[in-house]
Each structure stands twice: as structure tokens, then as C-alpha cells.
Amino acid sequence: MDQQQLNSLPEKTAILIVEDDAFMGSLLERKFEQESFHIFLATNAEKAREIIKSNRIAVILLDIVLPGMDGLGFLKELKATPNLKDIPVIITSNLGKPEEIERGLAEGASGYIIKAQVSTSEIVQKVREVLEKK
Amino acid sequence: MEEIKNFGKVKSFWFFQAMAVIAAAGLAVFNFIYLRAENISAFFVSLAINILLVFILATGAWRLARLFSDFKKGRDSLDTETQKKSSEIQEFEKITRQLVRRDLELARANQRLAELDAAKSDFISIAAHQLRTPLTGIKWSYTALLDPKTGSLNEDQKKLLKNGFAAITNTVNLVNDLLNVTHLEEGKYEFTFERQSLLPIAKQAIAGLKLVADEKKITLFSKMPASGLPDINMDGEKMGLVLANIIDNAIKYTPVGGRIDFSISQERGLIKIVVQDSGIGIPKSQKGRLFTKFFRADNAVGVQTDGTGLGLYMVKKIIDRHNGKITVDSAEGKGSTFIITIPEQSAKKS
């Protein structure tokens, strides 16, 4: 494709997936790319911060359990940053600490997903729902 | 005088006195002979005085003798008593020392048990949590492979993947169950009690399982009072789990085309929930272990090899927490009826 054609391609919705497990991250990336989303992957809060700074992110899928700063801490930080607080955040959990889902919702998450109980299609569906609500 | 009266009852006292009188008489004679008393009257006077004196002295001596003897007896018995008491005290001290030692041992053993228990729970929690992530990943891989968008598969590949997917789903369920059980046992599960009606919870449980029942062409009849059912103090979410579990079991173990009857009623201050199915039933010999951890009846395993055996265990724990009771009436091949009763007051203080 030449530059003109590239420029005229519709801009894909960019999703940031913050997931410390590389295997799961790659599976999610695969699925979302199949569904015509553009995916950014981050395995910790620090990398996620960098990605958000230099890209327009439509939705963030945020794991609660992360190395270093945990998901909830990062969520708090996002919601306290004026130009970032409106990006919808969906918490993904593997039920390690169920009470943290409650806390996440209280901190302003737009929804939550329990990975062990859903399929990747259902996650895509949830993201689509959240985007429509925007 | 009282004492002398008492002494008077003692034979040896009079004997003693008799001896004393004789001695007095002898003394008088001695007086008379050797001291040359002047006349008979003087003799008799001195005799009388002697007798009186001797009588008094003898009584005194007698008392003293008795006192000594009693004193000695008393001391002897006191000695024996003291010895007895002393050995009793020694025994007592020995037992006390043993008790203290035992108490220390028990405290130490208790602490070890608590540590082991925490370690076990930690282990299960950590293992379950650590297992969940790769298991979910594997499950998603299977889904991705089975997705036509990924690529086409031949029948053989499809079959292999479907079986793998089923196996993985069961494993994920087992891990979830294990974690739930651990949390329940630890009391980590927050029970939030609230006065509420069981009806909406029951309706939701039934609605959630209707599809599954329909797939097996099982008719699910429900009979609930439209109104008037008193609110009970309960954890709505947990009770929802209980009902869903019992109904799900009924569906699982009832063959195609069967029937399940669900009813809620009120009886003598108790809310009564009955789930009756026309399924495979429970063998009499196994009914006793139905609510124990990891137990699955033989005929159940025959019908459905997967199943963790943790559902009813959790159900019972939740019902116990509500101060309720669960019983089952069943015969192999003749269906099962589960009856749950919950007092309107309910809810043990944890």
C-alpha cells in the first residue's frame, strides 16, 4: 500500500491491555486484532503509563494483580490525571482477591471481567459495550 | 464439773480414785504410827483431810494424765492427718505440674495446627490462583483454535479440541470450587446478612437454569407463594448459590424428559424449600456422606464423570451459617427430594 492508501485507512480503535501474564496477553491480543482492534500490550503499570502518553487509547483492560504498582493503584492514578480520567477502564481479575473488584468499581472502573469465567469473545463484547456507552 | 462428771463415767477413773483413797488411808496410818498422833479423832481428822487432799490431787493428776494421753492421741492423729494431707498435696502438685505441662504441649500443638491450617489454606489459595491463569490461557487457546476465524479444521482435529476444551473447563471449575471451599472454611467469605425475601432470589436461580433444563427437555415446575412469605435474615448471594446448586444438581442427574418440582412454603416459623427430581436418586448406603467434601455417589459418577463433589459440601456450610437444615429423601433410581429449612430468625452470629 502506498502512503495515501495507508492514510485513508479507517483508524482502528486502540485498546491497551495491561496483563502481566504474557501468554494471556498474547491470546487477548490475537482475539482483539481478529476483531479489528489495534492492541497495545503492557505487562506492568510503568509500561502502561508510557503507552498511554504517546498513543490515543480508547479503552483500557486492566489486570488487578501486577508486578510493582498494582492495578488498583494505577487506576487511582489514572482517575486523578485530568486528561486521562475519562478513558474507560475495565478491570480484569482472576478472582485472586474478589474484594478488589469492589474497590476497583468504587475507584471508577467502568466494569469488571473475571477471566476464568468468560471467553475472549465475551471480553470483546464487553469492550464494545463500554465503547458504545462513551 | 462437767468434765469430772464425764470422767465419772470412766471405770478406770474410779479405780484410780480407789487406789488413791487406799494410799491416803495408808498415809494416815503412817501419820498415826510414826508421827504419834495423839488420839483417834485426830487420826480420823487427818485421815479425812488426807483423803480429801488425795482425792483432789488424784482428780487433778487424772485429768493431767488424760490430757497428756489425749494430747498425744491428738498429736498422733494430727501427725497421721498431716502426713496424709502432705502426700495428698504432693499428689496434687504432681498432677498440677502434669496439667501445666499438658497445657503447654496443647498450646504448642494448637499453634502448629493453626500454622499448618494457614499454610494449607495459603497453599490452596496460591495454587488455585496460580493455576487459574495458565488454565484460563489454555482454555482460551482451545477456543481460539476452535474458532473458524483462526482456520479450518478437519473433523478429527475438531473432536480432539472439543474434548480438550471440556477437560480444561472441568479443571477450571475444580480449581474454582477448591478456592471457594477454602474461602468458606476460613471464613474469608464475607457473609452479609440482610432481612429480605427469598422469592426474587429463587426466581433468579430458576431463570438462570431454565435454558439448561430446556436443553434436556426437563420440565421445571415451581410453586411459590405470591405474597405473605416473611422476610428472613440471610445473605442473599450465598442463598442464591445454594438454590442454584441444588437445582443444577437436579437437572444434572435427571435424565432427558424428566421433571423437577421446586417449591417454597412456610411452616411453623420456618421457611421450607423443596426440590424434587425424577432422577437417578441416591443409594441408601451413600446418603450419609452426601454433604461431605469431595464425595460423589457411585451412580452419579456413572452418569457424569466430571463433578467436583464440593457443591453440596458448600451448600451445607452456607445453610449451617444460616442456622438452617438440609435433608434428603431418596432411593436409587427413584429420584431425590432435597428439603431445606431456614428459621425466619436465622443467621448465627459468627
Image (cartoon, coloured by chain):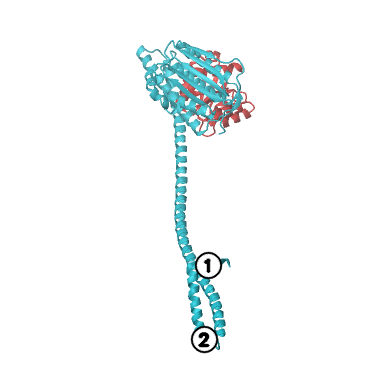
Q: Callout 2: residue from which chain?
A: B
**Rendered residue at 51%/65% (across/down):** B9
**Rendered residue at 37%/15% (across/down):** B159
Residue B152 at x, y percent in the picture: 40, 12
Picture mark count: 2
Name chain A's colour: red
Report the amino acid beneath label 1: Gly
Residue lying furthest front: B40
Residue B307 at x, y percent in the picture: 42, 22
Residue B155 at x, y percent in the picture: 36, 12
Q: Is residue B57 above or below residue B325?
A: below
* Residue A132 visible: yes
Quarter of the rendering containing residue B279: top left
Horizontally, is A122 left or right of A132 in the view?
left
Quarter of the rendering containing residue B342: top right
Foreground: disc 2 or disc 1: 2
Q: Which chain is cyan?
A: B
Q: Earlier in the sequence, mark 2 or mark 1?
A: 1
Q: Write down the residue under mark 1.
A: B8
Task: Classify mark 2: residues with Cα within 10 Å, few (<14), some (14-19) or many (20+).
Answer: some
Report the amino acid beneath label 2: Phe
Residue A64 at x, y percent in the picture: 53, 29
